[in-house]
Image: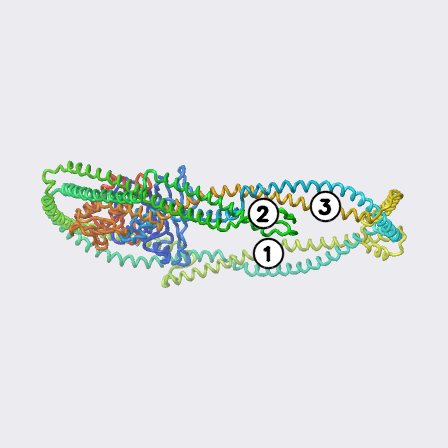
């Protein structure tokens, strides 16, 4: 990750909006952030981590984080962070949260937006997960990119489990954890084996001989079924002729009965026909007239009800109109005097301002008197500090002239450290090569003891597996044949005359086969099969063991090759290192003389540092006094300016008074006058509101009143029209009674109450006529057809029984043929399926052996632990390059057998001890070395061109020489395409770093950021 720009506002000590452009800082390669304690240095890192992950080191969600992060003088906090990720894509994150205007301690949850720059336009993303953009969790981001204050030692003090989890995440070691995948595959493979075994258990009786025997039976059954089919066709033809004749005689008898019933119904049908004629006549003449008359009567009742409700509403509106008119007339005089009241309101505001300004002028005069005295006191301190600074500068100049060049000393020391490191690395590498060679010899001896030819062991094992499988198949075939004979013997034993055979169905058994007892033979063959299976399992285990040993041997051989190449590189490095020694004033073989001269130079350096620190303190004190002097002078000028401005404003306000007189209020306080003003404002506002409301109400009632009167008049006219229409319908009904010769309207109502469906009744009458005539004609035709024919029911019964017997025989024969045909087809399909299942079973058993080998390799994440330890060792080796230089080859970092970090102390015979025994400064050095090595590995893993690394504090624990070494280490990182930011209050670093951010905290405006 490379930062581009950070904007913060209302966050911790940052009250006003501050923007940091990282462009020039990144180009410098090494930059710092400096400021006094509490100025807001660490807040910059916290703003970056909070923008990315919504997490901070100091506060969590239970700490009312948003409230405590917000500046107490601000009502809004805003963070905007632009950066480039490892894919060289630009992203922007904004987090914005505001204070509740009614509750000071209630700060709402932040609004979060993630955006990506595409075609010069920021496009919002559909998620807010920084881990997707950076490839790092929050915890590992703190260990490899930005290390918060007090967390620098976290990585070296992590437990083995947590450190392994971290390594898995950073280096994507999850790809080596195949345990679950192998377990799933093995479980699935075993499930497939179990299923196949279950399927094969259903094919024990399936064989080619059994299928041929059933096919011969099928041919015989087909002949029998063909003979029955011929007999059935002849009998069925005779029966169908008799059946048709019987049907005709029965039909004639039934139709005569039906005709008699219809003849009895004909009288009622004729009466219903007359009734339909009368109903249809009345319906056409009166039905619509009566419906229209009833509709008009209902409308008249409805209109009368509506007009009554409308008249009540009219009275209500007239009362409201009168009441509003009265209230408006009473309010009119007060409203007319409102302009004068508004002028009084404005002049009271001027008087309040005059009283406030008068009190402020008194306070400004008092502060001016105190300020003048303070200015004189600061001037005297400034003169004293200037004298002290000149004295310190002379002393430092004298010491510097006697000091040896520190750059030369550092370069020589680095050469000695590097030379010793290379020699130690060669010794360790030689031991590694020897250890790997011993391991290879152990594996080779183990294979030799088992008489294994490593070049052809796979082919040898496959051959032996094939031999055993051939034996097994032969034994299983022999077992199947014996089981068939055993089954036939059971069938033969259970056959009895008169009982059907379970295979062919025959009840005659003239020649029952005799089969010998095969129980012992079956037992012997089963034992032989079990012995072959046992041999296969032993051979499979042996194969797995050999494969495991061979895999380990190949892995060690690859590592041996790599270690030998490393050893060659180290020897070449040592030769090249000897050629680099070019300092004539030192001897490459006399390290003690170099140490003596270096210690003398360091003593002078410490004295210079001490004097420089005093000088820096005095300069800071002088700068602070000058700032105070300038601040006090500006404050005095501001007091005078404010006093003049307020006096001028008071005079202007008095001139604006026309209605009121200031003398009447001069003795009162500003608060009392302010209360009078507020009461007057409330009163004026209420009068204006009431007058407007009443006027609007009156305007609303006028159209309602007119509309209500119009509505009532319209309803009255509609009622008159409806009464006229009702009289017309009554006359039309009287005329219809006369024309159709009906005595009264009651007869009409009685007839219409029948409510007949004319079309339906007419259709029923027609249907009856058609049935009657059709049945009459049909009886006549059948009588003519059967006039000279007779029917014998006894002959019919005999022929029917004969057909049933032949049909039953045919059905049984066809079912037997079909059943046997289906059984043969199923057996053929089963036989083919059995062969496929046996082939598949062989594949699954071989796969089970391979999966068992993989399971042993990946069990309990062992392979991941192994790979993690390799990565940790590489990290130690990379970290030691810098750690040796920082500790002058006195200490070294290593990983023990439990994957925990240890320190090798060369001043104590190279014994190992816990990293927890290190001093604060040493812990910082080893943590910095490890963090840099870890960050380099992350950079290499992400394939990024450049990477960013931020350190918060830590330099305060170092002495002057250690600071020099650490600083040179960090300065060289720029050449390695690394960017390092440092947060510190050590002033010596500020002078040596080419570019930095300076943070100053202002009591009124909060923290300010500037680039220096």
Residue 915: mark: none
Q: Which of the two residues, 980 or 414, is positioned nearer the viewer here? A: 414
Q: Pick whichever of labels 2 and 3 is earlier in the sequence.
A: 2
Q: Are marks 3 and 1 in contact (CB under 8 Å)?
A: no
User: Crowding at label 3, few (<14), some or many (≥20) Cα neighbours within 10 Å?
Assistant: some
- Asked if residue 493 is positioned above or below residue 404 in the image, the reply reads below
The answer to whether residue 777 is seen in the rendering is no
Q: Pick whichever of labels 3 and 1 is earlier in the sequence.
A: 1
Q: Residue under circle 2?
A: 513
Q: Which of the two residues, 421 or 497, is positioned nearer the viewer here? A: 497
Whole-percent x and y of residue 787?
A: 89, 44
Mark 2 or 3, closer to the camera:
2
Q: Which residue is at 78% across, 55% downward? A: 294
The answer to whether residue 633 is left or right of residue 488 is left
Q: Residue under circle 1?
A: 698
The answer to whether residue 207 is left or right of residue 944 is right
Q: Which residue is at 71% across, 53% downward? A: 714
Name the quarter where the C terminus is drawn.
Answer: top left
Name the quarter where the N terminus is drawn.
Answer: top left
Q: Secondary structure at mark 3?
A: helix
Q: Residue under circle 3?
A: 807
Mark 3 or 1, closer to the camera:
3
The answer to whether residue 242 is left or right of residue 963 is right
Q: Secondary structure at mark 1?
A: helix
The answer to whether residue 499 is left or right of residue 15 is right
User: Crowding at label 2, few (<14), some or many (≥20) Cα neighbours within 10 Å?
Assistant: few
Whole-percent x and y of residue 534?
A: 41, 48
Q: Are marks 2 and 3 in contact (CB under 8 Å)?
A: no
């Amino acid at each position: 990750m490379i930062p581009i720009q950070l904007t913060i506002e209302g966050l911790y000590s940052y009250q006003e909006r501050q923007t940091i452009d990282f462009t020039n800082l990144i180009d410098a390669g090494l930059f710092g952030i400096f400021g006094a304690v509490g100025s807001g240095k660490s807040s910059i890192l916290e703003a970056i981590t909070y923008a990315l992950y919504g997490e901070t080191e100091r506060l969590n969600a239970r700490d009312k984080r948003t409230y405590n992060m917000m500046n107490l003088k601000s009502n809004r906090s805003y963070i905007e962070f632009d950066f480039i990720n490892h894919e060289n894509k630009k992203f922007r994150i904004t987090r914005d949260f505001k204070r509740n205007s009614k509750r000071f301690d209630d700060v709402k949850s932040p609004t979060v937006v993630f955006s990506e720059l595409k075609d010069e336009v920021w496009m919002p993303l559909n998620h807010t997960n920084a881990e997707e953009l950076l490839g790092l969790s929050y915890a590992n981001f703190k260990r490899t990119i930005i290390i918060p204050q007090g967390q620098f030692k976290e990585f070296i003090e992590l437990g083995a489990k947590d450190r392994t989890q971290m390594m898995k995440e950073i280096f994507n070691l999850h790809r080596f954890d195949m345990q679950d995948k192998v377990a799933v595959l093995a479980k699935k493979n075993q499930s497939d084996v179990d299923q196949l075994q279950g399927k094969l258990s259903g094919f024990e009786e399936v064989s080619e001989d059994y299928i041929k025997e059933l096919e011969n039976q099928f041919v015989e059954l087909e002949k029998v079924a063909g003979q029955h089919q011929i007999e059935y066709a002849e009998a069925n033809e005779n029966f169908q002729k008799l059946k048709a004749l019987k049907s005709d005689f029965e039909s004639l008898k039934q139709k005569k009965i039906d005709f008699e019933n219809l003849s009895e119904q004909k009288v009622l049908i004729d009466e219903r026909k007359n009734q339909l004629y009368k109903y249809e006549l009345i319906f056409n003449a009166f039905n619509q007239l009566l419906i229209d008359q009833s509709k008009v009567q209902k409308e008249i009742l409805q209109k009368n009800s509506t007009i009554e409700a409308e008249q009540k509403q009219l009275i209500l509106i007239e009362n409201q109109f009168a009441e509003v008119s009265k209230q408006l007339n009473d309010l009119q005089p007060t409203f007319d005097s409102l302009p004068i009241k508004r002028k009084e309101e404005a002049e009271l505001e001027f008087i309040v301002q005059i009283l406030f300004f008068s009190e402020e002028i008194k306070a400004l005069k008092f502060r001016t008197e105190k300020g003048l005295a303070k200015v004189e006191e600061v001037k005297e301190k400034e003169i004293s500090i200037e004298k002290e600074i000149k004295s310190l500068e002379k002393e430092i100049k004298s010491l510097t002239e006697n000091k040896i060049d520190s750059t030369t000393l550092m370069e020589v020391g680095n050469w000695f450290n590097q030379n010793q490191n290379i020699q130690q690395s060669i010794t360790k590498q030689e031991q590694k090569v020897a250890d790997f060679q011993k391991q290879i010899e152990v594996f080779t001896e183990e294979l030799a003891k088992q008489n294994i030819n490593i070049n052809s062991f796979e082919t040898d094992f496959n051959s032996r597996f094939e031999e055993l499988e051939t034996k097994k198949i032969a034994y299983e075939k022999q077992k199947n044949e014996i089981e068939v004979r055993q089954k036939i013997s059971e069938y033969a034993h259970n056959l009895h005359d008169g009982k059907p055979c379970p295979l062919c169905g025959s009840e005659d058994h003239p020649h029952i086969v005799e089969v010998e007892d095969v129980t012992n033979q079956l037992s012997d063959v089963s034992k032989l099969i079990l012995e072959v299976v046992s041999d296969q399992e032993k051979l499979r285990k042996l194969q797995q063991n050999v494969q495991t040993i061979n895999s380990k041997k190949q892995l060690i051989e690859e590592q041996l090759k790599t270690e030998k190449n490393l050893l060659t590189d180290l020897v070449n490095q040592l030769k090249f290192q000897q050629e680099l020694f070019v300092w004539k004033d030192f001897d490459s073989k006399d390290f003690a003389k170099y140490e003596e001269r270096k210690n003398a130079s360091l003593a002078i350096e410490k004295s210079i540092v001490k004097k420089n620190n005093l000088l820096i303190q005095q300069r800071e004190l002088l700068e602070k006094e000058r700032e105070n002097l300038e601040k006090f002078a500006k404050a005095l000028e501001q007091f005078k300016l404010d006093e003049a401005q307020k006096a001028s404003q008071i005079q202007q306000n008095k001139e604006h008074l026309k209605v009121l007189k200031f003398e009447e209020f001069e003795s009162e306080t500003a608060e009392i006058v302010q209360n009078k003003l507020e009461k007057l404002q409330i009163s004026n506002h209420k009068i204006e509101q009431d007058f407007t409301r009443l006027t609007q109400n009156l305007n609303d009632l006028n159209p309602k009143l007119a509309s209500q009167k119009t509505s009532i008049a319209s309803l009255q006219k509609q009622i008159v029209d409806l009464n006229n229409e009702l009289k017309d319908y009554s006359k039309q009904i009287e005329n219809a009674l006369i024309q159709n010769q009906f005595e009264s309207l009651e007869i009409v109502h009685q007839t219409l109450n029948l409510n007949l469906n004319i079309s339906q009744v007419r259709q029923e009458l027609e249907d009856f006529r058609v049935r009657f005539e059709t049945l009459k004609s049909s009886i006549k035709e059948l009588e003519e057809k059967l006039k000279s024919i007779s029917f014998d029911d006894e002959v019919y019964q005999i022929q029917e029984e004969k057909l049933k017997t032949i049909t039953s025989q045919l059905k049984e024969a066809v079912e037997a043929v079909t059943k046997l045909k289906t059984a043969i087809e199923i057996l053929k399909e089963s036989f083919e399926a059995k062969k496929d299942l046996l082939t598949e079973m062989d594949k699954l058993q071989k796969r089970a052996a391979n999966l068992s080998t993989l399971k042993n390799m990946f069990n309990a994440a062992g392979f991941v632990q192994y790979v993690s330890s390799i990565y940790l060792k590489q990290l130690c080796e990379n970290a030691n390059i810098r750690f040796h230089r920082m500790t002058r080859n006195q200490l070294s970092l290593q990983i023990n057998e439990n994957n925990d970090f240890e320190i090798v102390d060369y001043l104590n015979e190279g014994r190992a001890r816990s990293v927890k025994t290190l001093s604060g400064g040493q812990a910082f050095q080893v943590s910095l070395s490890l963090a840099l090595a870890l960050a380099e590995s992350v950079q290499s893993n992400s394939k990024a061109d450049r990477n960013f690394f931020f350190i918060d504090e830590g330099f305060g624990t170092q002495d002057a020489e250690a600071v020099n070494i650490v600083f040179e280490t960090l300065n060289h990182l720029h050449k390695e395409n690394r960017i390092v930011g440092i947060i510190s209050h050590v002033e010596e670093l500020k002078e040596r770093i080419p570019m930095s951010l300076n943070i100053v905290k202002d009591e009124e405006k909060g923290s300010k950021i500037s680039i220096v």
